[in-house]
Image (tube, helix red, strand yellow):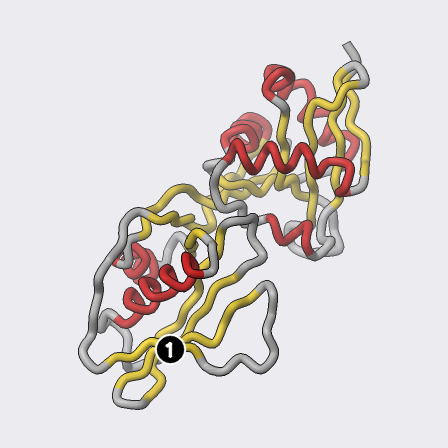
């Protein structure tokens, strides 16, 4: 049996990525690495057949190519993952892994071949619809003079005519997901404004034909509580580790 990993263009592995994203059925935060040409891609072959693919980017510097962030094997070849992954390390020279814990195959490779593993962020997915309301608070979007296809920003909360929070939706993740971001001004925090903003941004995401999602630093308890109050729930973690 011949196991082989070869560098290829993104277009060569796009059909395999489509299967990976369909099978995964979650927001894949590293999708932007391909959009912005931050990654190198590899085709995995078994006896000359397309068996899977991998992608590498720079853990600390985008110009480096030292961290595996995608590794996918088609179901008929998945049992060979433990033969393919070491070959990927050899060919690519990767010394790190970054992955989502809900990406079960790459997470398994992280725990088998990695060390010094740490969780960096919590991932959130939609759970239920909330009906939060704060008297006197208005949600609206400012006039957008220069639309950005990857960033739907300019949403604000106003209290008595004063802007007290802002936020938006990042659209550079895999379809149909949109990633919520927001900020509440100092002096107005811990009043429920953050959760109200997230609730309203969830609605905006659906109106765009997107599914809302979010993430926060694993140590940010305030953001975690805000997202959960707005009807999101933890669905995974961003994990990082070094390779043996």
The residue at 47%/41% (across/down) is: 26
Q: Is 143 displayed left or right of 65 in the figure?
A: left
Q: Residue furthest left?
A: 135
Q: Is 11 displayed left or right of 154 in the figure?
A: right
| Mark 1 surroundings within 10 Å by alpha-carbon count, few (fewer than 14), some (14 through 19), many (20 or more) | few
The residue at 79%/31% (across/down) is: 91
Number of marks in the rendered image: 1
Image x and y of residue 22, in percent: 54, 35
Relative to 152, does residue 44 appear above or below in the rendering? above
The residue at 49%/51% (across/down) is: 177
Image x and y of residue 23, in percent: 52, 31
Q: Is 90 displayed left or right of 148 in the figure?
A: right
Q: Residue furthest bottom?
A: 161
- In the rendered view of the protein, which quadrant contains the N terminus? top right
Q: Which residue is mark 1?
A: 140
Asked whether 200 or 47 is in front, the reply is: 200
Relative to 138, does residue 74 appear above or below in the rendering? above
Asked whether 94 or 197 is in front, the reply is: 197
- In the rendered view of the protein, which quadrant contains the C terminus? top right
Image x and y of residue 121, in percent: 44, 51
The residue at 28%/74% (across/down) is: 189
Q: Secondary structure at mark 1?
A: strand
Image x and y of residue 122, in percent: 41, 49
């Amino acid at each position: 049996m011949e196991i082989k990993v070869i560098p290829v263009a993104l277009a060569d592995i796009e059909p395999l990525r489509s299967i990976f994203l369909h099978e995964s059925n979650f927001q894949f935060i590293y999708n932007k690495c391909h959009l912005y040409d931050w990654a190198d891609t590899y085709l995995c072959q078994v006896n000359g057949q397309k068996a899977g693919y991998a992608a590498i980017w720079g853990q600390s510097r985008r110009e480096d190519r030292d961290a595996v962030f995608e590794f996918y094997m088609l179901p008929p070849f998945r049992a060979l993952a433990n033969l393919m992954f070491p070959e990927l390390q050899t060919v690519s020279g990767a010394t790190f892994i970054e992955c989502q814990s809900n990406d079960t195959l790459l997470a398994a490779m992280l725990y088998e071949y990695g060390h010094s593993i740490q969780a960096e962020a919590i991932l959130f997915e939609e759970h239920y619809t909330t009906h939060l309301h704060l008297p006197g608070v208005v949600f609206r979007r400012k006039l957008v003079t220069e639309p950005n296809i990857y960033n739907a920003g300019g949403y604000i909360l106003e209290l008595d005519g004063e802007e007290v929070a802002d936020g938006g939706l990042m659209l550079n993740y895999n379809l149909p997901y949109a990633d919520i971001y927001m900020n509440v001004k100092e002096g107005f925090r811990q009043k429920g404004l953050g959760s109200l903003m997230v609730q309203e941004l969830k609605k905006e995401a659906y109106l765009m034909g997107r599914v809302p999602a979010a993430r926060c630093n694993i140590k940010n308890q305030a953001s975690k509580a805000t997202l959960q109050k707005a009807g999101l729930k933890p669905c995974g973690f961003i994990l990082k580790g070094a390779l043996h």
